[in-house]
Image: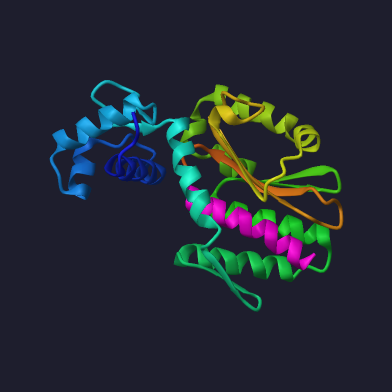
Amino acid sequence: MEITPRQKEILCQIIEEYAETASPVGSVTLAKLFDVSPATIRAEMAKLEALGMIAQPHTSAGRVPTDAGYRFYVNNLENSLQDEFYETDTTYVIEDGGISRGMHALHRRVSSQSQADAAIRGAVDTLVELTGNLGLATIGGQLYLSGISRLFTQPEFMDTRRVQSVAKLLDNLEPWLREAAPGEALNIFIGHENPIGKNSEVSLIISKFRSPFSDRSYIGVLGPTRQNYSRVMALVKRAGSMLEEIL
């Protein structure tokens, strides 16, 4: 069974609505957005559920995206992300105004630092402020982390088991980055795709860049699978390329 254009639109809306509300998305909400009956939406949701793209956490509840649904969504984002940037001197712009302000904040923070390690830390701290996720970067063989408290205030981490799983992931992240050395400019690991902490239900989004410390330095964020991927992916990718240009 292949996903239809309307099912794709419904999936994207579920993902984006869930990112905003952290609550399962119901057929009535979607029916208003698509100007069709709730029964029509429920029929399309059933097909998306059969495809493994969404799930129903409770009887009579709305739907939430699965890891497979997020992966489908992210793959489509990656295909379009490359063409969204343009540059004018030192000003970095993207079509969405909110992301544009984030780009400017990143550039101001990075370009104001005279030392490479301070620039990388500044970029990480800015990503934390812009995304609400945990920020991370490799600096001279060590892992710099920022925003752990911000991450754990999100509703997903009311469950202590998930907090423990994330802690395990963080304990093993630096040696994994050193050994696996992901080679893409932008690398996204969603939920169970994470090589460590598979049950933590988080997404790791990292960008590889060249720095004075290494040809394989990394910067990125770790957050719940429920997040604004278009914004976070664009900011992380630009943070990596900006650091490589400036350092």
Residue sitting at 49 percent across and 37 percent down? 71
Q: On the picture, is 233 further left or further right than 218?
A: left
Q: Please say whether residue 242 is one of the residues in the magenta stretch.
A: yes
Residue sitting at 46 percent across and 31 percent down? 68
Foreground: 124 or 37? Answer: 37
Residue 56 visible within the image: no
Q: On the picture, is 37 further left or further right than 89?
A: left
Q: What stretch is highlighted in magenta?
A: 228-247
When the figure is inspected, residue 169 is found, relative to residue 238, above or below; the finding is above
When the figure is inspected, residue 224 is found, relative to residue 246, above or below; the finding is above
When the figure is inspected, residue 169 is found, relative to residue 138, above or below; the finding is above
When the figure is inspected, residue 144 is found, relative to residue 155, above or below; the finding is below
Q: Return the x and y of residue 230 as percentages of the image width and height.
A: 48, 52
Residue 26 visible within the image: yes
Magenta stretch, overall SS: helix
Q: Return the x and y of residue 213 as percentages of the image width and height.
A: 86, 53
Q: Which quarter shows the C terminus?
A: bottom right
Q: On the picture, is 183 further left or further right than 50?
A: right
Q: Quadrant of residue 92?
A: bottom right
Q: On the picture, is 73 further left or further right than 240?
A: left
Foreground: 177 or 123? Answer: 177
Residue sitting at 76 percent across and 67 percent down? 246
Label total for image: 0
Q: Please say whether residue 72 is one of the residues in the magenta stretch.
A: no
Q: Return the x and y of residue 81 as percentages of the image width and height.
A: 52, 56
Q: Return the x and y of residue 146 as percentages of the image width and height.
A: 68, 47
